[in-house]
Image: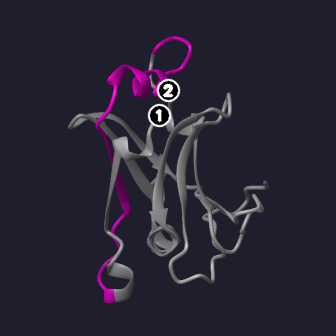
Amino acid sequence: MRRDYFELDVENVSWVDDGDDPKKPQVRIDFHGPREVLEGRLSDPTGGYLDASETDVAFRLQEPLDDPDAAGVVSVTNRITGDFILELNESAADVLTFIRAAREYGRNADDDGRYRVEVHIDGEEAVVYEKQTFLVYDADGNLLRSHSLIPSGVEL
């Protein structure tokens, strides 16, 4: 599936720097491509959509993190099969800002997720996931724990 089929929009991240009240960071992913392909990837063997607990979100750098123009690939994968559900290109600075906001929000949040992911297909909401984990990997595939969002008590 082509990465240019996807558009990503982020909300509720500026409050960290602005000193405003915490708001749950949200990412909306809009898909404009063959509907049946993404629906198939979002579905479990019974045909229903995967639950949040059956998916993983990660960011894989393509350049060193200290490069001011570093970019990488955001991916959502099926936790059971390891298959990619979707991938899209993003700047490292934007992703790390999002993770920082999710980390700060999670320090005082009483709900299940530190951030929210919404996937829309041609403007229609397909799935909404409340997530707590967002893993960051360098270009060689090594986990960058200090940049990742890993809930306490989770062992990787």
Describe residue 31's horizontal placement relative to residue 41 as left or right.
left
Q: Residues within 10 Å of mark 2 (few under 14, many from 20)?
A: some
Residue 19 seen from this side = no
Give me the residue at 31% from left, 79% from top.
21
Q: Residue at x 34, y 25 (%)?
A: 34
Work out whether residue 41 can be spotted: yes
Amino acid at circle 2: Arg
Q: CA distance from mark 1 to mark 2?
A: 10 Å
Residue 27 location in percent, x, y? 37, 55
> Residue 33, position in %: x, y?
32, 32
Which of the marked residues, 1 or 2, is nearer the chain's N terminus? 1
Residue 123, above or below 104: above
Q: Residue at x 29, y 83 (%)?
A: 20
Stretch of the chain drawn in magenta? 18-47
| Residue that numbered label 2 is attached to | 41
Query: Residue 124: percent from the left, percent from the top?
Result: 22, 33
Which circle, 1 or 2, is nearer the viewer? 1
Residue 116, percent from left and from top: 40, 52
Looking at the rendered structure, the kind of residue marked 1 is Met
Residue 10 versus residue 150: which sits nearer the camera?
10
Q: Confirm whether the magenta stretch covers residue 2.
A: no
Most foreground residue, 97 or 1: 1
Q: Is residue 17 left or right of residue 122?
A: right
- Residue closer to the observer: 41 or 129: 41
Magenta span contains residue 38: yes
